[in-house]
Amino acid sequence: MASFKFCPDCSNMLYPREDRVKQQLMFACRNCDHQEEAENNCVYRHEVTHIPSEQTMVITDLSSDPTLPRTNQIPCPKCQFDEAVYFQSQSRHPDTRMTLYYVCCRATCQYRWTS
């Protein structure tokens, strides 16, 4: 089980650091000179990733946002209205290709689709 370690001198969090000379995992304070050897050589890293389509569902009234670019070249697949706003995926994941998201500007439709 992963747990946080704290400096006994200044009570700040200890961060993992490699001692390259001894080839050993250490925990070191970033505020003072305190260091201690790690009891376990396993370091846990937890990254939270979001699917871009999940993020777009949080924002409402995208069609009325004046900062988003608009197009009349791509009609809405649901209602055939000729105006839509579009934006790029905000995902920074290296395996994700660039995706354009469209939102219909008709107030009664607001349909969302991707390119």
Image: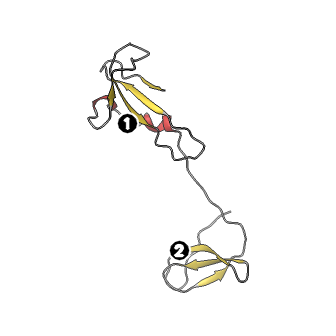
Q: How is the image coloured?
A: secondary structure
Residue 59 is labelled as: 1
Residue 97 is labelled as: none
Name above or below for residue 49 compared with residue 15.
above
In-image side of 49 versus 41 (left or right): left
Q: Position of residue 115 (x, y in %)?
A: 48, 26
Amino acid type, mark 2: Met
Q: Nearer the viewer, mark 1 or mark 2?
A: 1
| Dot 2 alpha-carbon crowd within 10 angstroms: few under 14, some 14 to 19, many 20 or more | some
Where on the picture, by quarter, is residue 36? Answer: bottom right
Question: Measuring 40% from the left and 20% from the top, which residue is drawn there?
Answer: 74
Q: Position of residue 114 (x, y in %)?
A: 48, 27
Question: Measuring 34% from the left and 15% from the top, which residue is drawn there?
Answer: 81
Name above or below for residue 20 compared with residue 59.
below
Q: How many callouts does the rendering have?
A: 2
Instruction: Please state which of residues 79 and 6 is positioned toward the viewer in this rendering.
Output: 79
Question: Measuring 58% from the left and 53% from the top, which residue is drawn there?
Answer: 47
Q: Are marks 1 and 2 in contact (CB under 8 Å)?
A: no
Name above or below for residue 47 compared with residue 13.
above
Q: Position of residue 2 (x, y in %)?
A: 65, 64
Amino acid type, mark 1: Ile
Q: Quadrant of the N terminus?
A: bottom right
- Report helix, strand or loop for mark 1: loop
Of mark 1 and mark 2, the one earlier in the sequence is 2
Residue 13 is labelled as: 2
- Report helix, strand or loop for mark 2: loop
Residue that extends furthest to the front in the rendered view of this protein: 73
In-image side of 111 versus 21 (left or right): left
Q: Mark 1 to mark 2: distance in Å?
A: 35 Å
| Dot 1 alpha-carbon crowd within 10 angstroms: few under 14, some 14 to 19, many 20 or more | few
Question: Measuring 61% from the left and 83% from the top, which residue is drawn there?
Answer: 35
